[in-house]
Image (spheres, grey):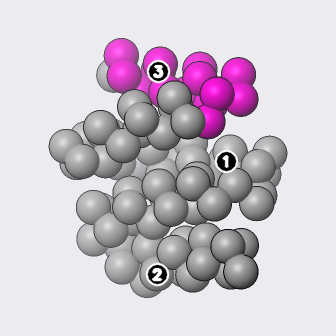
C-alpha cells in the first residue's frame, strides 16, 4: 500500500509523470487495481485532457479484465491526441 499512497500524494501534488510511474508498477503487478482505477478516475476531474492518465486508466481496466471500460478510456485518449 506504500506505493499506492505515494502515487496518490504525487497525483494530488500535480506530479503526474511520477505518479503514473508508481501506478504503472501496481497495474503491471495487478495490485490494488480498484484503488488505482478510483484514483485515476477521480484525477480526471482535475486533469480531463491528460492523455497519459486516460492511457493508464485503460491499462488498469485491462488488467482488471474490464475490457469495455478499457476500450472507452483508450478511445478517449486517442480522441485527445487528434
User: Magenta residues, as a range?
Assistant: 2-16
Q: Pointer 2: what residue?
A: 71
Q: Is the magenta stretch mostly helix, strand or loop?
A: helix
Percent from the top left, x then y, of residue 64? Answer: 29, 62
Q: Nearer the viewer, residue 42 or 28?
A: 28
- On residue 8, the disc is none
Percent from the top left, x then y, of residue 35? Answer: 44, 42
Q: Pointer 3: what residue?
A: 5
Location of residue 60 by image quarter: bottom left
Describe the element under mark 2 as helix, strand or loop: helix
- On residue 42, the disc is 1
Question: Is 4 above or below relative to 73?
Answer: above
Percent from the top left, x then y, of residue 26? Answer: 30, 39
Residue visible at 47% across and 21% down? 5
The image quadrant where one finds the C terminus is bottom right
Query: What whole-number distance in Å separates the C-alpha atoms at marks 1 and 2?
Result: 18 Å
Amino acid at each position: 500500500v506504500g506505493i499506492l499512497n505515494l502515487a496518490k500524494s504525487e497525483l494530488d501534488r500535480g506530479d503526474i509523470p511520477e505518479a503514473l510511474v508508481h501506478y504503472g508498477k501496481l497495474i503491471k503487478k495487478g495490485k490494488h487495481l480498484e484503488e488505482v482505477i478510483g484514483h485515476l478516475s477521480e484525477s480526471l476531474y482535475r486533469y480531463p485532457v491528460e492523455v497519459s492518465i486516460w492511457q493508464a486508466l485503460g491499462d488498469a481496466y485491462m488488467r482488471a479484465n474490464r475490457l469495455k471500460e478499457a476500450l472507452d478510456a483508450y478511445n478517449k485518449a486517442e480522441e485527445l491526441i487528434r
